[in-house]
Amino acid sequence: MPPLAPPIERVISELSKLPGVGRKTAQRFALHLLKVEPGDVAALVEALSELRARMRFCEICFNLSDGTRCPVCADPRRDPTIVCVVEDAANAVAIEKANAFQGVYHVLGGVLSPLKDVGPDDLRVGELLERVRRDGIREVILATNPSVEGEATAVYLSRLLKPAGVAVSRLAQGLPAGADLEFTDELTLQRALEGRREY
């Protein structure tokens, strides 16, 4: 294939930075964008700009939101005394798809990883402990991924939370080791939530 023009190469390079998008897929996307109506491209550019401009973190749980509170925290039907701790917003979305959890979330913003120099101060651990003290939390479900880092984070949080007198549980086994919650099917997540155990 002959070399592509610099504007196309730039788009391919930028799209290749997205997770799961290799050069071939990025090239396919870039060439497709040249075929669609200019209005469709403008709409995509506007949607991406709006995404960056309007999205922020929920003031309570740190999930993604376009307001001060995310839809889960703002929903009066949710049980605010049961908090599901997840690594990132994608994990909360995955659990919501299972339609089996009626509590609220706490998004840590990652997991403990000494090799990547990520410690407790780099996560929203202090904010979680403050919520437990302040908001009368009855149960904290540790829903970090079943990876080495996710398990280490769950053990660390469990040790901090138990002295606070709150029930601490962990998602049940059934989630494959090394898996990402974001890519786990709804039935597996539902069973994992229903079969959670004390941690």
Image (cartoon, helix red, strand yellow):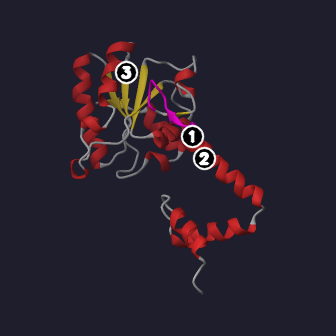
16 in relation to 167, above or below: below
- 22 above or below 111? below
Checking the image for residue 49, the label placed there is 2
How many residues crowd mark 3 within 10 Å: few (<14), some (14–19), many (20+)? some
Of helix, strand and loop, which one carries label 1?
helix
Per the model, the C-alpha gap separating discs 1 and 2 is 6 Å
Residue 138 among those drawn in magenta? no
Of badges 3 and 1, the one in the foreground is 1
Q: Amino acid at mark 3?
A: Glu
- Residue at image location 31% in from the left, 18% down from the top: 166
Residue type at tag 2: Ser
The front one of 166 and 57 is 57
- The residue range painted magenta reads 53-62
Whether 43 is drawn above or below 136: the answer is below
**Residue extending farthest front:** 6
Across and down, in percent, residue 115 comes to 22, 52
Which of disc 1 and disc 3 is earlier in sequence? Answer: 1
Residue that numbered label 3 is attached to: 139
Q: Residue at x 55, y 43 (%)?
A: 52
Q: Main secondary structure of the magenta part?
A: loop
Secondary structure beneath label 2: helix
Can you give x and y, in whole percent of width and height, for residue 175 in the image?
40, 46
Q: Are marks 1 and 2 in contact (CB under 8 Å)?
A: yes
Residue, far bottom: 2
Residue at the image point whose x is 78% and y is 61% from the top: 37
C-alpha span from label 3 to label 1: 35 Å
Q: CA distance from mark 2 to mark 3?
A: 38 Å
Image quarter hosting the C terminus: top left
- The amino acid pointed to by label 1 is Ala
Q: Quadrant of residue 67?
A: top right
Label 2 or label 3, whichever lies nearer to me, is: 2
Residue annotated with mark 1: 53
